[in-house]
Image (cartoon, rainbow, N blue to C red):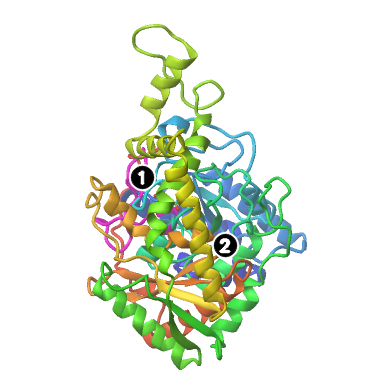
Amino acid sequence: MSDLTRLGAAEMARLLRDGELSSVELTQAHLDRIEAVDGAVHAFLQTLPEAALAQAQAADAARAAGEDLPALAGVPIAVKDVLATKGLRTTCGSRILENWIPAYDATVVRKLRQAHLPVLGKTNMDEFAMGSSTEHSAFGPTRNPWDLERIPGGSGGGSAAAVGAFEAPLALGSDTGGSIRQPAAVTGTVGVKPTYGAVSRYGLVAMASSLDQVGPVARNVLDTALLHELIGGHDPKDQTSLNEPVARAVDAARLGLGGDVKGLRVGIVRELGGRGYQRGVLDRFDEALGELRSLGASVREISCPSFRYALPAYYLIMPSEASSNLARFDAMRYGLRVDPQTGPVTAETVMGATRAAGFGAEVKRRIILGTYALSAGYYDAYYGSAQKVRTLIQQDFENAWEQVDVLVSPTSPTTAFKLGEKLDDPLAMYLADVATIPVNLAGIPGMSVPCGLAEDRLPVGFQILAPARADAFLYQVGGALEAALEAKWGAPLLARAPGLPQGPSRTEGGVK
Ligand code: GLN
């Protein structure tokens, strides 16, 4: 069978179930694809060919033995390097963890292993998930498969690029302010940030614990739904884990794919659009709304006035939590240790030298910001005010849910920008997440689904938001939109991605 890597994960799973394909064949096809294109894309920090093939063999053996296997058994996956993998280096895109080998698996990784999904490798990311372009990785940037001179989004640019470049049908990401949805938007893939607490954070290297959430990336809505159901559910090892059943994502996706959104009430967020948003992004967004209307959804505008304070509030809360979380990198317990060049060697000087050498500029900026925001005398003015804004944003959402079932907006104000374009302007970089951040502050779920190409021939993402614990709505609306748009286009959006150059096998620019 040719070009196995072009299939969707659900289709791969069907062929595996029907015995028309083995997991070893499928995994090898992806390893070959990675070999061919990842020199150019650099989605992976580390590939795991032997381990992945061994897992594939085990999946095939379990199937041959007649075991009752989960839906995605045998389908390979890529994992963002922010998730702990037992016995395998987990760098978080940072020098300070360059050689860290965790002694345990993140709960979501354990679930992948138990369900027999071969892990192809660990994907690139902005250092400690801080960024919107993957350029803050200590190991070099990832490139957008649509245009190698452009960013793949961030912080999870590696996972989105791997899926967009057909190097993996599925990937795991993490989303603190948009790191699953914004990369999905700019690479033409689907990304979901589940309700806070719906997916375990155990083994997810903490950035801002009250905002972080693990979620799926794939090339279509059904595939993200299958992965969501696999990784979701209560975990006693995560104290913020919700103790309730996993969202019925797959049923909802199928409902939507069948065109069933009749009577659904859709709200356009007035504050997320207009000035500052690229023309082509707004045009594709409006056309997608038209599709939902023709399917029988009712569409109206909703105002969320506090959203204008979301970005400043996020950039106080997130750095505050990160400055506290990252205090654990003290050179004593694990990770890098650098001794001072001169003077006495004390705990303090070693810690200073290690953190100076081990953290990149963006991480240092946020630690300083967060430490300042939390310091005595400033705490109420900065951190305290930001928490109040957080409450106002939650109230905006609560008001909206009295009037509509879902809210929608463009996922990102622009399409993929050029590498280097925003690197010297942190504020410009932060603005890439202006539409994704309110979701994390409120703990609600959000999805980005492709809605076409802008005037620059680059993908645009359509963002769907739902009330907490109502993740199923995302899959229903996302599925309906995907089916309607693909019917119009005659093919999935990614079928139109320009062919990637057959780059050399990856030999440079990443951790080996
Ligand atoms: N880009 C945002 C930031 O830099 C979001 C990051 C994330 O979601 N991990 O903080």
Of tags 1 and 2, which is closer to the observer? 2
Looking at the image, is 291 positioned above or below residue 495? below
State yes or no: Cβ of the residue under disc 1 lies below 8 Å from any atom of ligand 1.
no
Q: Relative to the observer, which residue lies in front, 411 or 147?
A: 411
* Residue at the image point whose x is 44% and y is 42% from the top: 319
Looking at the image, is 86 positioned above or below residue 54? above
State yes or no: Cβ of the residue under disc 2 lies below 8 Å from any atom of ligand 1.
no
Q: Quadrant of residue 358?
A: top left
Residue labelled with disc 2: 194
Q: Relative to the observer, which residue lies in front, 266 or 182?
A: 266
- Residue 294 relative to residue 103: left or right: left
Magenta-tinted stretch: 134-160
User: What secondary structure predominates along the stretch shown in magenta?
Assistant: loop
Q: Please name the amino acid that badge 2 sits on.
A: Pro
Q: Please name the amino acid that badge 1 sits on.
A: Arg
- Do the CB atoms of the residues marked 1 and 2 lie less than 8 Å apart? no
Badge 2 crowding class, 10 Å Cα cut-off, few under 14, some 14 to 19, many 20 or more, is many
Q: Reply yes or no: does residue 153 show up in magenta.
A: yes
Residue 40 is situated, as x and y percent measured from the top left of the image, at 31, 51
Residue 122 is situated, as x and y percent measured from the top left of the image, at 49, 46
> Of the residues under marks 1 and 2, which one precedes in the sequence?
2
Residue labelled with disc 1: 506
SS of the residue under disc 2? loop
Badge 1 crowding class, 10 Å Cα cut-off, few under 14, some 14 to 19, many 20 or more, is many
